[in-house]
């Protein structure tokens, strides 16, 4: 039985990897926030208890119901939150909603892996030999926490936290029965990439991936370049720029975080292994506003997409006009380029798309064989200035739990209205859980619904529910 397989963005979700906000997020200080890829510092307890915990309970209700059904009052009454902590007896421990920290602890039980991984982390963090010896004395649970948070049980910091690990999407992407590993653009994410690599190559859960893990590397010419040239020509790729939209079709964004060199290498490797037959490259403006392609569009069901109108065919008139910011940009900075590469017996063919709507419409019709009316839901209901404002707080970054049912953020009011205008229901996550507990609603019967997650602190971390998930098993899209 396959336990790792993803062939779409909207097939019913069966298994995913998440990482709950850890203490490292509470150690982000203003002077280091941007170095660690945060726009602001967040309030950890609010993010956990009032926001992410609801995300986790929603996931469990859809993927592993027995862990939570009829137990929410007891779970919420426990002020220590032991249900969410992998080291506690009351931890939910699901093999469907899988905590990254638990996977890490599992492989640290393997002596050889523990030695290698600890040495590798100490090398990239430039730890002293004495610190490395201190780590060797820790229990598996404590070591897993230190490798993620950088902080010893004594509260002494050995190295920086990796607060972006909450966004597990970026560590890799399952492409049918293969895994494409990321190669992060920013040093702040190097350690999480290393931890993920050891997990995927060593954990029994991923035994089916043996020989099917694809890594992006630098070519030999790169090492001969001068240092200043090397920095500008790295092969970097992050999971938020990769979408498995159909069994034959992968999307790769070229963005602030993913380079064209890495995209080209991914095409060569995936085509050589015949993993997919079609790969579309989407070059988006290299702006912090956008970051990855999943910050400007995601798929809700086969014929429904949510996207930023200013990068699509339809634009709100006020957003078409030049602004002072645009006047100061270099030519081509705002360019959107879409090129599709199709692997055919007589060679690779290339096709251009003028805009996102044309591409996404083609995915719906040509790849998913869906001929229902195609609906585009626009960020901020395509009203100036709400399109840009709500895109910044992840109005386009939704995780589909099954076709037509997705998780978004409650603060994006105009986008929620756009969904309602298109025939969707919207419901607050807290209310939905209450209705699940009372049997007024059930995950199995829910249709065309956007679940609105509390998001004041989560949105400040610059990632939505799509970012906070790494699907490893989905049903085929229907």
Image: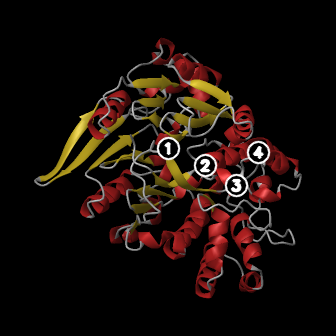
Residue 170: horizontal and vertical position, in percent?
A: 53, 54
Give the secondary structure at mark 1. loop
Give the secondary structure at mark 2. loop
Residue 248: horizontal and vertical position, in percent?
A: 29, 49
Task: Compare marks 2 and 3 and give the one earlier in the sequence.
Answer: 3
Residues tagged 3 and 1 counted as in contact (Cβ below 8 A): no
Q: CA distance from mark 2 to mark 4?
A: 13 Å
Q: Which residue is mark 4?
A: 47
User: Looking at the figure, which quarter contains the C terminus?
Assistant: top left
- Let me know if residue 36 appears in the view: no
Residue 292 marker: 1
Which residue sits furthest front? 439
Q: Which residue is mark 2?
A: 468
Name the front one of labels 2 and 3. 3
Task: Compare marks 1 and 4 and give the one earlier in the sequence.
Answer: 4
Give the secondary structure at mark 4. helix
Q: CA distance from mark 2 to mark 3?
A: 20 Å
| Residue at the (72%, 38%) spot, across then down | 433
Residues tagged 1 and 4 counted as in contact (Cβ below 8 A): no
């Amino acid at each position: 039985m396959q336990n790792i397989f993803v062939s779409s963005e909207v097939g019913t979700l069966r298994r995913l990897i998440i990482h709950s906000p850890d203490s490292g997020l509470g150690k982000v200080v203003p002077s280091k926030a941007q170095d660690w890829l945060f726009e602001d510092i967040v309030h950890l307890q609010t993010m956990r208890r009032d926001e992410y915990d609801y995300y986790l309970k929603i996931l469990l209700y859809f993927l592993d119901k027995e862990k939570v059904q009829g137990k929410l009052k007891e779970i919420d009454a426990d002020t220590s939150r032991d249900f969410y902590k992998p080291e506690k007896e009351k931890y939910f421990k699901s093999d469907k909603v899988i905590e990254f920290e638990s996977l890490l602890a599992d492989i640290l039980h393997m002596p050889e892996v523990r030695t290698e991984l600890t040495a590798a982390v100490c090398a990239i963090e430039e730890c002293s030999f004495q610190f490395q010896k201190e780590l060797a004395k820790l229990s598996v649970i404590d070591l897993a926490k230190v490798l993620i948070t950088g902080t010893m049980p004594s509260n002494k910091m050995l190295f920086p936290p990796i607060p972006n690990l909450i966004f597990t999407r970026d560590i890799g992407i399952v492409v049918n029965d293969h895994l494409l590993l990321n190669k992060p653009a920013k040093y702040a994410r190097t350690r999480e990439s290393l931890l993920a690599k050891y997990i995927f190559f060593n954990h029994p859960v991923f035994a089916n991936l043996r020989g099917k893990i694809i890594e992006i590397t630098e070519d030999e010419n790169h090492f001969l370049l001068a240092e200043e040239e090397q920095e500008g020509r790295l092969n970097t790729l992050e999971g938020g720029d990769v979408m498995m939209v159909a069994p034959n079709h992968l999307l790769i964004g070229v963005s602030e975080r993913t380079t064209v060199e890495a995209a080209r290498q991914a095409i060569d490797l995936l085509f050589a292994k015949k993993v997919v037959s079609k790969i579309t490259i989407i070059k988006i403006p290299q702006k912090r506003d956008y970051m990855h392609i999943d910050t400007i569009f995601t798929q809700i069901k086969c014929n429904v997409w949510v996207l930023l109108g200013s990068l699509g065919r339809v634009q709100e008139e006020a957003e078409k006009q030049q602004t002072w910011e645009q006047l100061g940009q270099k030519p081509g900075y705002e360019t959107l380029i879409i090129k599709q590469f199709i692997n055919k017996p007589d060679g690779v063919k290339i096709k251009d798309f003028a805009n996102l709507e044309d591409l996404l419409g083609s995915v719906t019709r040509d790849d998913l064989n869906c001929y229902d009316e195609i609906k585009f839901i626009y960020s901020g209901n395509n009203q100036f200035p709400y399109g840009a404002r709500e895109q910044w707080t992840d109005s386009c970054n939704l995780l589909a739990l099954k076709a037509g049912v997705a998780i978004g953020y409650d603060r994006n009011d105009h986008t929620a209205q756009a969904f309602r205008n298109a025939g969707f229901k919207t419901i607050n996550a807290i209310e939905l859980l209450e209705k699940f507990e009372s049997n007024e609603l059930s995950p199995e019967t829910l249709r065309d619904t956007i679940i609105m997650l509390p998001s004041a602190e989560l949105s400040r971390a610059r990632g939505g529910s799509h970012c906070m998930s790494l699907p490893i098993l989905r049903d085929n899209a229907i």
